[in-house]
Image: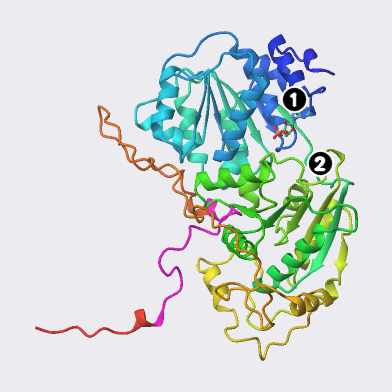
Amino acid sequence: MSFSDLGLSQKVVDAVSAAGYTQPTPIQAQAIPHVLARKDVLGIAQTGTGKTAAFTLPMLSILEQGRARARMPRTLILEPTRELAAQVEEAFIKYAPNHKLNVALLIGGVSFADQDAKITRGADVLIATPGRLLDHFERGKLLLTGIEILVIDEADRMLDMGFIPDIERIAGLCPFTRQTLFFTATMPPEIQRVTEQFLSSPVKIEVARPSSTAATITQKLVATHGKDYEKRETLRQLIQTAVSDSDGNPLKNGIIFCNRKTEVATLFRSLQRHGFSVGALHGDMDQRSRMAALDAFRKNELTLLVASDVAARGLDIPDVSHVFNYDIPHHAEDYVHRIGRTGRAGRLGTAYTLVARGDEKYLQAIEKLITKTIEWEAGDMSSLPERAPGEADEAPRRGRGGERDRKREKPRGGREGREHVRTAREQKIIDAAAASDANGEDATPVERAPRAERAPRPDRAPRAERADRPERGERPERAARPEPAPRREAPPRRDDRRRNRDDDGPTPKGFGDFMPGFLMQGAAIKKD
Ligand code: AMP
């Protein structure tokens, strides 16, 4: 089957062949004719299946008829994150070089004024994150009554992020007669309910979830101690060895996955201090830093990218030579997604997974899913070091002060009294451990080697996301009615937070759950 068999306009078929695609992917072949027939579609597919083109290509054909009116966009695509929204905008630019269409991107972290100007001009395609879209709506800048096609992408991730109430509200603002295209990777009951509410006699298209890993990826397990500072040493050693990989796949670039955003930030800073060329991607970073890190990694200006699953999910990063699972994923499917970042299109890829005591059950689940036993690079499960007394259980969720608690676990003046059984690899690493942190974060009781050259500080350290605040210096607009305050992108609801694997709750404020002793002391109140 070719693209010209699907009923797409000639302009779109030409653009697709200019993009270098010869054959539609299964989701494209199945969805495009139904979208063109103006049916509602429920697509169960994840990124990497070509689902973006499955909705953008027929939308382009449909949009060739008619024109947009001021403040009344014709089509709306909702994405859970700014990066995914920006990626869909890129797809429109790529597939529509010959279409004179106005595409507006409404995402947080960017000035309202530019976005307003685009909506005012009339948008054929509006791509938005839910929070920023509602901000514009509440400011009276936008009407959704002209929407002909509503696309809800990555719906299960919207659920994870607590966006479903916003999505319900937005769908209620669109006309009843609209066409709805709904994409989700999984079908939890809440998503099932939402599809029944939003879709009218949809055509259901399901593309198999990948449960197998590409044969071109070499997968290895590496035994490590669970303590963070030793784990970081194991990782550094692994990266250095991978640079001159004897298996014929030397490290060109790599993504390092952590289970939590706090871990991403800590590991990023640590690698940076050790002189690695590294960027970070997690939900607490401001938009500019996220985009800059991603861009630099794509252009090979950065060798390593430390990322969380949620921040990296769905991002199209081609040609990665290595994946490092610094934390073993707690959901076996995440393992398949993570290592699927490498070994693409028949290229060689290497995936290392660090395994510590307590990770056994996660490893078993992964091996069961991929129906394969992963080889150990060094040691095996029985050689994993015992956990030290008081060492935190590697449970999927830590409490709010988790990061601080882990810092407090660190030995302050050496590790006397600790009884660790180290793997041969760890012992080698500890013995050879060279660099140590400027502030002693990674301090080990070995001699310090000459410090690796200090990498330049990023212009901004990751900070709490201020998604939809107006840009500094931007004057709040004067509207006829009082302006509602700009909102952050919808904060996850309490029950949804538990589901969000990127996020162990909001970044702790003040002392978090930790109560310093001095606050507990009684205070003398002076009597008059
Ligand atoms: P997506 O699942 O939409 O994120 O797409 C994943 C990747 O597949 C993107 O890099 C697309 O450019 C690419 N892609 C989409 N459709 C095709 C196709 N028919 N043939 C080859 N590559 C494609």
In this picture, is 468 found above or below 245? above
Q: Earlier in the sequence, mark 2 or mark 1?
A: 1
Does the magenta portion include 506? Answer: yes
Please provide the residue range marked out in magenta: 496-517
Would you call the spot at circle 1 few (<14 residues within 10 Å), some (14-19), or many (20 or more)?
Answer: many
Residue nearest the observer in this picture, 271 or 156:
271
Q: Amino acid at mark 1?
A: Gln
Residue nearest the observer in this picture, 354 or 459:
459
Q: Residue at x 37, y 26 (%)?
A: 141
**Residue 385 seen in the current view:** no
Q: Amino acid at mark 2?
A: Arg
Horizontal and vertical percent position of residue 527: 12, 84
Mark 1 near ligand 1 (CB under 8 Å)? yes
In this picture, is 310 found above or below 130? below
Horizontal and vertical percent position of residue 155: 60, 38
Residue nearest the observer in this picture, 228 or 175:
228
Horizontal and vertical percent position of residue 340: 78, 46
Question: In the drawing, does residue 258 fall left or right of residue 141?
Answer: right
Mark 2 near ligand 1 (CB under 8 Å)? no
Query: To which residue does mark 2 refer?
Result: 344
Question: In the drawing, does residue 93 fall left or right of residue 110?
Answer: right
**SS of the residue under disc 1:** helix
Does the magenta portion include 405? Answer: no
In this picture, is 434 found above or below 130? below
Q: Which part of the image, by quadrant, shows the N terminus?
A: top right
**SS of the residue under disc 2:** helix
Magenta stretch, main secondary structure, is loop
Query: To which residue does mark 1 refer?
Result: 28
* Image mark for residue 204: none
